Amino acid sequence: MRLRRRIAFAAATVLGAAVAVLPAIAGSETVPSVEAVNVGGVYGEEHHWSPSQVTLAAGGAVVLSNPSEVRHGVYWVGGPATPSCSPGVPVGVNETASGTKWSGTCTFSAPGLYTFYCTVHGPAMTGRVTVTAPTTTGTAPSSTPTAPSPGAGAGGSTPPGGEAGAGGSTPASAPAGAVRLHAAQHSTAVVGSLEVSAAGAGGRLQVDVLARRGVRLKRIGHLSRTRVRAGRLSFTVVLDARAAHSLARHGRLSATVRVLLVSPQGATLRVSRRLELRL
């Protein structure tokens, strides 16, 4: 009899512990976390969000954090709505909205694809949040609208002059048309131009030149302009000292040029081209 009581008591204790633990596990699975990460690179530190993409249901939240001493911030560049973020998350359009050792949450009410950059490191540090539409019992799940990703035009398709860099006509809602880079880049700077549409007038232009190190790209040149005008816009991006030294030493340098134009309405155009710099 005493042995049976001891066995029953032990079983009740184990089951009670399981009841206490299971809700905590279930609750933690509903809040994904995205963290700023810094790693060493050939031109200094490289930075990225980890993970770079998360998925959650509409009405859910994501924990965003930067536990390091390197300054990072959050700049929302695409999405069906603006997420609601707690005061702990530095949100803005430039590096004044940044900080070290911060943490907070952002809540997403509308389904779709949300894209954000670091306010300090730009497109080189891109993160995405996919928010799924809620489903109703007895009915088919509603379709999930998606915001145009960087380099996508109306309807989410890549416009001419987008990621592939082709020329041609441009949807009226796109912030820019064709992007051109000079075929002969015989200097320590990258020279190019783009046609800013009426929809892109007043927007922000960012041009980054990156060099590859293993599977990662490191920024070696940067240009940023605000309140750009409609029409042909020329740009020149000067390489940093280390990249210029490498080019002078080897006589050539393979690079990737990324052009980003964000319209005042939030529409984005992103173009990526590979080229070889020579002296």
Image (tube, helix red, strand yellow):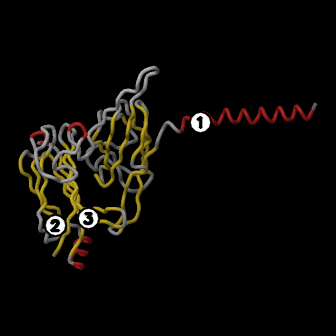
Q: Amino acid at mark 1?
A: Ala
Which element is circle 1 on? helix
Q: Amino acid at mark 3?
A: Ile
- Side of 103 relative to 182 (left or right): right
The answer to whether residue 182 of the structure is visible from this angle is yes
Which element is circle 2 on? strand
Residue ID for mark 1: 24
Instruction: List x then y, in percent, for residue 174.
Output: 16, 41
Whole-number angstrom distance, CA of label 2 to CA of label 3: 10 Å
Q: Residue at x 21, y 67 (%)?
A: 239
Whole-number angstrom distance, CA of label 3 to CA of label 1: 45 Å
Whole-number angstrom distance, CA of label 1 to CA of label 2: 54 Å
Looking at the rendered image, the quarter that the C terminus falls into is bottom left
Residue ID for mark 2: 189
The label number, if any, that marks residue 220 in the structure image: 3
Q: Amino acid at mark 2?
A: Ala
